[in-house]
């Protein structure tokens, strides 16, 4: 059946464009759910994947502008809820879903992003207890990274003023919510470290929803906290709120006020601690004095009559002198025996004996060399005679002596071997065994 009139013929491009217009006009806002598969993430930043269920599958694309807003990482087999519009990819003639928003089915996108980042950073060892630094006992300056207008800084000021008013407090104001807030918090931590501006840092904000606290769940904040050389206390939200910053920090405080209480002891606590240390020091000194007194008394009881001690020492000196004398005699005997052995070895190596041996060897070698030279000269003489006979036999003069001659062209001196090289009237030179002759060709025959 022809829907557009009798025998209306479309080009492929035209028909595809019509179908694309129909689909985009009627399916410009579609919600789908399905299982993610065939995920591809090229360098362009676009995301390509397939949504499928038990009965069908649909190609999907999420362009870079939308993909940048994703808070979590897509994984094969993940169940998703997707919003987008149906379109046609002209080059392949396939319809596809252009995704504008997606979230994991059953769990919020932020919660999933939080769990994924937490697991990845934990696998790197970013939260290991061994990497956490202790807080200073008596910090002189405390830096607070938070909003300048929030309740956090006021709570911290109240607690510190009540507990230890002599402390210096430095506020580094940042945004604690919204796009770019995480980068500001990380920059503040880096700046305070670069300036070495404090002995301890408090990073925090008041309570709120997961989205409100999200700046403290960003990876850039966690890594800034972990590379900080200044110990960091995380005081984000209420006691039930947990963020990535809490796991990365050296200490997590349930509230900003609790962070201020943790960072320094009150004057009364310090005085009590000082009294305890003083009492412990007094007891330790008394115990040390008593122990030294007992040691002196023991040494006094162990001290003997000096004359008896000198007698024992004199006896020991005599014993050592006798052992020294015996040792010297034994050493002298060993040295004498060693010297006699060396003299015998030296006599065996006397130069006259060595020279006599070498002279005999030289005589033998001279006789052997003379015999070899004589034999070599005789052999060379024989070989020369034989070579002379062979050379004489192969000499061209012997060939000429048997009646042959060498024919050469007078013009160029070439040796002629074939009658075809001759021409009537050509002048030739004949070389004979004795002498030669000039000739002229009268006739030739092949």
Image (cartoon, grey):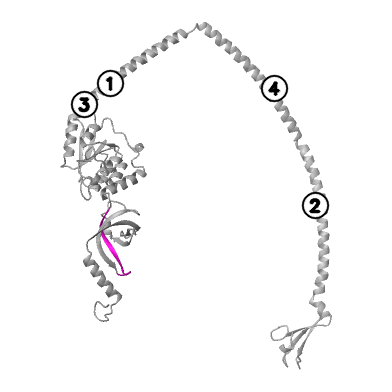
Q: Which residue position holds label 1?
A: 276
Q: Residue at x 44, y 10 (%)?
A: 298
Q: Which mark is residue 190?
A: none
Viewer-nearest of labels 4 and 3?
3
Residue range (magenta): 90-103
**Which of the 4 image quarters holds residue 94?**
bottom left
Q: Which residue position holds label 4?
A: 333
Task: Using the rendered image of the protein, determine whether residue 442 is visible from the camera's viewpoint.
Answer: no
Mark 4–mark 1 Cα distance, whole angstroms, equals 74 Å
Q: Residue at x 82, y 53 (%)?
A: 370
Q: Please, what secondary structure does the residue beneath circle 4 have?
A: helix
The image shows residue 31 at horizontal and vertical percentages of 24, 58
Q: Please report whichever mark, 2 or 1, sits nearer to the chain's N-terminal start.
A: 1
Q: Please report whichever mark, 4 or 1, sits nearer to the chain's N-terminal start.
A: 1
Task: Using the rendered image of the protein, determine whether residue 146 is visible from the camera's viewpoint.
Answer: yes
Mark 2–mark 1 Cα distance, whole angstroms, equals 106 Å
Vertical order, 40 against 400 (above or below): above
The image shows residue 352 at horizontal and vertical percentages of 77, 37
Q: Which residue position holds label 3?
A: 267
All told, the count of numbered labels is: 4
Q: Which mark is residue 369?
A: 2
Q: Please report whichever mark, 1 or 3, sits nearer to the chain's N-terminal start.
A: 3
Mark 1–mark 3 Cα distance, whole angstroms, equals 14 Å
Vertical order, 61 against 121 (above or below): below
């Amino acid at each position: 059946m022809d829907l557009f009139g009798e025998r209306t013929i479309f080009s492929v491009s035209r028909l595809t464009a019509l179908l694309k217009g129909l689909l985009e006009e009627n399916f410009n806002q579609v919600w789908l759910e399905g299982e993610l598969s065939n995920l591809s993430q090229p360098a362009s930043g676009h995301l390509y994947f397939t949504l499928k269920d038990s009965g069908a599958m649909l190609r999907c694309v999420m362009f870079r502008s939308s993909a940048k807003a994703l808070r979590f990482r897509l994984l094969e087999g993940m169940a998703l809820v997707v919003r987008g519009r149906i379109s046609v990819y002209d080059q392949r003639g396939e319809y596809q879903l252009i995704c504008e928003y997606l979230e994991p089915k059953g769990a919020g996108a932020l919660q999933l992003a939080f769990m994924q980042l937490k697991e990845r950073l934990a696998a790197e060892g970013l939260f290991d207890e061994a990497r956490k630094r202790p807080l200073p006992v008596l910090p002189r300056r405390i830096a607070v990274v938070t909003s300048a207008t929030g309740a956090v800084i006021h709570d911290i000021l109240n607690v510190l003023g009540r507990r230890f008013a002599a402390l210096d407090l430095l506020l580094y104001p940042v945004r604690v919510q919204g796009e770019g807030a995480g980068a500001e918090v990380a920059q503040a931590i880096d700046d305070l470290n670069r300036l070495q501006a404090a002995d301890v840092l408090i990073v925090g904000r008041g309570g709120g929803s997961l989205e409100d606290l999200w700046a403290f769940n960003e990876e850039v904040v966690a890594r800034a906290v972990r590379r900080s050389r200044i110990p960091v206390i995380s005081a984000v939200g209420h006691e039930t709120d947990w963020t990535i910053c809490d796991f990365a920090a050296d200490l997590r405080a349930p509230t900003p006020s609790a962070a201020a209480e943790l960072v320094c002891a009150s004057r009364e606590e310090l005085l009590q601690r000082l009294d305890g240390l003083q009492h412990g020091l007094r007891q330790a000194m008394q115990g040390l004095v008593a122990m030294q007194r007992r040691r002196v008394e023991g040494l006094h009881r162990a001290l003997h009559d000096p004359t008896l001690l000198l007698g024992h020492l004199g006896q020991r000196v005599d014993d050592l002198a006798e052992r020294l004398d015996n040792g010297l005699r034994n050493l002298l005997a060993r040295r004498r025996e060693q010297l006699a052995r060396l003299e015998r070895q030296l006599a065996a190596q006397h130069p006259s004996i060595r020279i006599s041996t070498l002279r005999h060897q030289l005589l033998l070698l001279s006789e052997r060399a003379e015999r070899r030279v004589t034999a070599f000269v005789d052999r060379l003489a024989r070989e020369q005679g034989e070579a002379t006979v062979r050379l004489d036999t192969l000499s061209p003069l012997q060939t000429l002596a048997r009646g042959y001659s060498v024919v050469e062209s007078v013009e160029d001196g070439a040796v002629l071997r074939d009658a075809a090289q001759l021409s009537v009237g050509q002048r030739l030179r004949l070389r004979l065994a004795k002498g030669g002759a000039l000739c002229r060709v009268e006739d030739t025959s092949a």
